[in-house]
Image (spheres, rainbow, N blue to C red):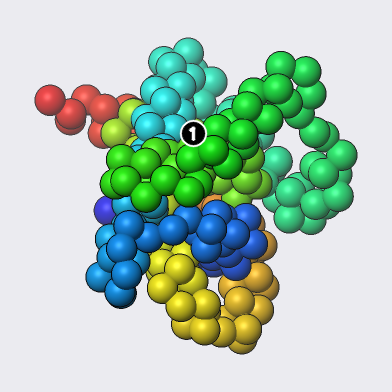
Amino acid sequence: MDPMFATALVLGVAGSAHCIGMCGPIALAVPSSGTGTGARLRSTLLLNGGRLTTYLLLGMAIGTFGHGLRLAGLQQVISVVAGVLLLLSVLLPGLLRRFSPAGRLSMGLSHLRSLLARNLKRTAPEALFFTGLLNGLLPCGLLYAALLGASSHASAMDGALFMLFFGLGTWPALIALRLGGGLVRDGARTWLRRASPVLVSVVAILMILRGLELGIPYVSPGPVMAASATMECP
């Protein structure tokens, strides 16, 4: 398995504290379609399934973009630049906070939030899944970090797999939060908050190494190794 997929999974787990802060209020606001733990679990899976579907689609799109970059001979440069930006987001978080969406992007985000707010109280299965789809589109720094990691892959399938592992990594904390907030203890949240920048840094370093093509198997394959792997594909 590509080590970047394992990194995506751990990144999702380490970023769970951030997810609780960003997506937690939505997860708690969405009602269940019935009473009891079973109904709450079903609604939770539908909600998170919709969010994961959005992540998969975004991963496919960014993986296709990465494939185009590979054909143009630019993917290595983009991988290094993306890794540097990720490191900056950890070392200088205030620098990135200065940039905010404007114009049509802000209007689109406002419309998305309004649509999400109108859909929050609906309990039909398709409504819960749709709420999850919309939730996955909300602006999120951790999501952007994962998408940068997915961009280092040269196919839609690999990009989708990267985002799949990332999304699954966020599931345990959000499911536990919705089923019972006490399941996510303060100590675990503190550990997750401290681990998040470390894991983002690991992803950034892996992306930089991959872009540099140093000839390290799996981590930073050289151009000869990459070309050989391509020729072996049917």
Q: Crowdedness of circle 1 by 10 Å Cα count: few (<14), some, many (20+)?
A: many
- The vertical placement of 231 against 123, above or below, is above
Q: Tell me what residue is drawn at x 48 percent, y 48 percent.
A: 121
Give the total number of marks visible in the rendering. Answer: 1
Looking at the image, residue 225 sits to the left or right of residue 190; the answer is left
* Any part of residue 186 in sight: yes
Can you give x and y, in whole percent of width and height, for residue 148 in the image? Answer: 55, 39
Reading the image, the residue beneath label 1 is 151
Indicate the position of residue 225 as horizontal and vertical percent values: 34, 36
Residue 49 on image: x %, y %: 33, 49
- Local secondary structure at mark 1: loop
Q: Is residue 10 left or right of residue 227?
A: right
Residue drawn 82% across the image and 34% down it: 99
Picture residue at 44% right of the left edge, 32% below the top: 58
Q: Quadrant of residue 41?
A: bottom left
Q: Eyeballing the image, is 167 above or below 112?
A: below
Q: Quadrant of residue 118?
A: top right
Please name whichever residue, 52 or 31, is drawn nearer the observer in this view of the structure: 31
